[in-house]
Amino acid sequence: MARNILILGASYGSLLATKLLMAGHNVTLVCRQKTADLINRDGTEVRIKLRDEPKHRSIFSRDLPGKLDAMPPQNVDVSRYDMVGLAMQEPQYTNHTIRTLMVKIAAANLPCLSIMNMPPLAYLKRIDKLDGMDLEEAYTNASVWERFKPGLVTLCSPDPQAFRPPEEAANVLHVGLPTNFKAAAFADEAHNKVLRELEADIDAVKLDGQDVPVKLKVFDSLFVPLAKWSMLLTGNYRCITPDDPVSIRDAVHKDLKLSQSIYDHVDAVAQKLGADPADQVPFEKYAKAAESLLKPSSAARAVASGAPFIERVDLLVKLISHQIGMPNAEIDRTVDTVDNKLNVAEGGGGAD
């Protein structure tokens, strides 16, 4: 049965969209009118490398069994959809037309699968030790999530690394690290039935008889997606320095012992919240993957280009760690560095 999925965000969201389209499901991408016109005219192109192949393949949406369209947020009819994917950067949800759409999604009680690095605040309320904790400071506008029922929001660890090549059109996405989306289950089994259906359909897809990487994997544990926090705090946010940004590889491998200490501490924070060590990714596996990540993180690139706001998982982890009595000086130092760079971008008084 073909499902209709609404995905907010046409950049990173086009990766999940392509996987769904390959499995025969229909997808609407929510984006700016100019990008929507481009996608409706030409479709999307996602470049991905299959196992043991030396070059990336281009997968074009127009060649896939599912149907793709794109539209600006004000044109969306939420009654058409079975599920929503949240694939925008967290600060983008403060845009007025996006917020209006989010109100409609919440009112329609649609299940929402987030592939953001920053977990929706409603999702964190599903974790007993975080429910009621003071975490709003980490969000650009925490009120965006007030109308969402926690059980209808789940989180998917956005482990695949992908980016829009700057010299290409806005409908092109290049996948640098084709790992899996690891999703926690919803609270309601009716929604999990749809989620597991999508998981199985994506898993069955073949391309010229070959398996296609970037699967959707569903887990019962709420903590599996939190494994990404260790990676973000060890690599992505440490790409932001007082000077120019550095690659994820350099951020991790410049001082591997320090990197492991940060990684292990964030893992320990997650375990204090209730995570099983089996929910988490060993540091050695992450460090090996980081060797191929030769660009600065999207957060570092955004700060370097003058963005006044970025997703602040670094600040979220700091707030949590302090409130559970597990502060860490290196994490605090990272947060201070990011704060200072953002203050400079805003024209504030932060020193470089």
Image (cartoon, grey):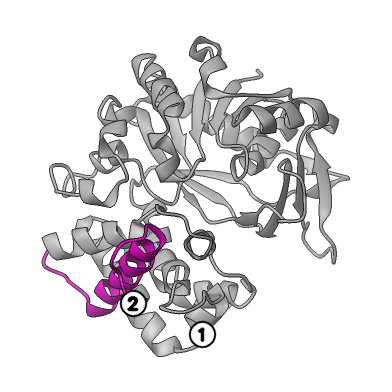
Q: Pointer 2: what residue?
A: 262
Q: Are marks 2 and 1 in contact (CB under 8 Å)?
A: no
Q: In which quarter of the image is residue 106?
A: top left
Where residue 208 appears, as percent x and y from the top left, is 88, 45
Vertical placement of residue 269 versus 174, above or below: below
- Circle 1: residue type: His
Kindly state the secondary structure of the residue where label 2 is placed.
helix
Quarter in which the C terminus is drawn: bottom left
**Towards the viewer: 351 or 309:** 351
Q: Pointer 1: what residue?
A: 253
Where residue 174 appears, as percent x and y from the top left, is 72, 54
Where residue 141 appears, as percent x and y from the top left, is 29, 40
Using the numbered discs, state the Cα–Cα distance from disc 2 to disc 1 in whole angstroms. 13 Å
Vertical placement of residue 167 versus 5, above or below: below
Kindly state the secondary structure of the residue where label 1 is placed.
helix
**Residue neighbourhood size for the residue with mark 1, other residues' Cα within 10 Å, grouped as few (<14), some (14–19), many (≥20):** some
**Towards the viewer: 325 or 198:** 325
Vertical placement of residue 287 versus 41, above or below: below
Residue 192 is inside the magenta segment? no
Count of numbered badges drawn on the protein: 2
**Residue lying farthest to the right in this orientation:** 208
Q: Give the range drawn in magenta.
A: 324-352
Where residue 335 appears, as percent x and y from the top left, is 30, 68
Q: Which residue appears at 37% of the width and 86% of the height?
A: 258
The answer to whether residue 321 is seen in the rendering is: yes
- Circle 2: residue type: Ile
210 relative position to 184: left or right: right
The answer to whether residue 184 is seen in the rendering is: no
Q: Which residue appears at 59% of the width and 55% of the height?
A: 160
Q: In which quarter of the image is residue 341?
A: bottom left
Vertical placement of residue 37 versus 250, above or below: above
Residue 336 is inside the magenta segment? yes
